Amino acid sequence: MATHNATIERKDSSATLKLALGETVLDIVLTEDKPNDVKTVFNKLLEQLKSGEFDFNLSDEKEDLYFHICKEYITQLNAELKSTYKELQDNGLL
């Protein structure tokens, strides 16, 4: 199983969780309420699952509120990716 990096980009008025998949970086803006953007990112992650199981590791130097939110988000995302990969495998969709 491959492990990819997740980082947090902080700016004055925004924060973004960045999920790196090789050269592709998927962004989830933490300071905006855009559920369709999150769905788009998740759909891209599902497409990547067809190439093999993977998870994310959050690396960040600052332990603030965004760090704790992202840490929990990555934990949930990794669990979801793992169970979805198993479902794809069990149903012969890989």
Image (cartoon, rainbow, N blue to C red):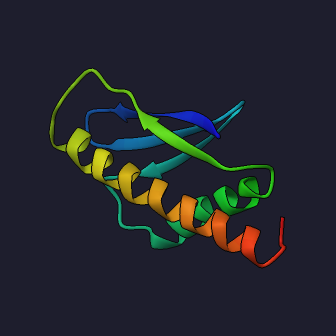
**On the rendered structure, is 6 left or right of 69?**
right
User: Which residue is at the far left?
Assistant: 64
* Residue 63 place in picture, x, y as percent: 17, 30
Q: Quadrant of residue 24?
A: top right
User: Which residue is at the far front?
Assistant: 90
Q: Tell me the residue at 57%/34% (across/down).
A: 4
User: Which residue is at the far bottom?
Assistant: 91
**On the rendered structure, is 91 left or right of 42?**
right
Q: Tell me the residue at 55%/67% (across/down).
A: 83
62 relative to 49, above or below = above
23 relative to 56, above or below = above
**Tag count in the figure?**
0
Q: Nearer the viewer, residue 87 or 59?
A: 87
Which quadrant is the N terminus positioned in? top right
Q: Tell me the residue at 32%/26% (across/down).
A: 60
Which quadrant is the C terminus positioned in? bottom right
Q: Nearer the viewer, residue 82 or 73?
A: 82
* Residue 88 place in picture, x, y as percent: 73, 71
Q: Quadrant of residue 7?
A: top left
Q: Is residue 37 visible?
A: no
* Residue 43 place in picture, x, y as percent: 66, 66
Q: Nearer the viewer, residue 24 or 51?
A: 51
**On the rendered structure, is 89 left or right of 63?**
right
Q: Is residue 51 visible?
A: yes
Q: Tell me the residue at 84%/74% (across/down).
A: 92
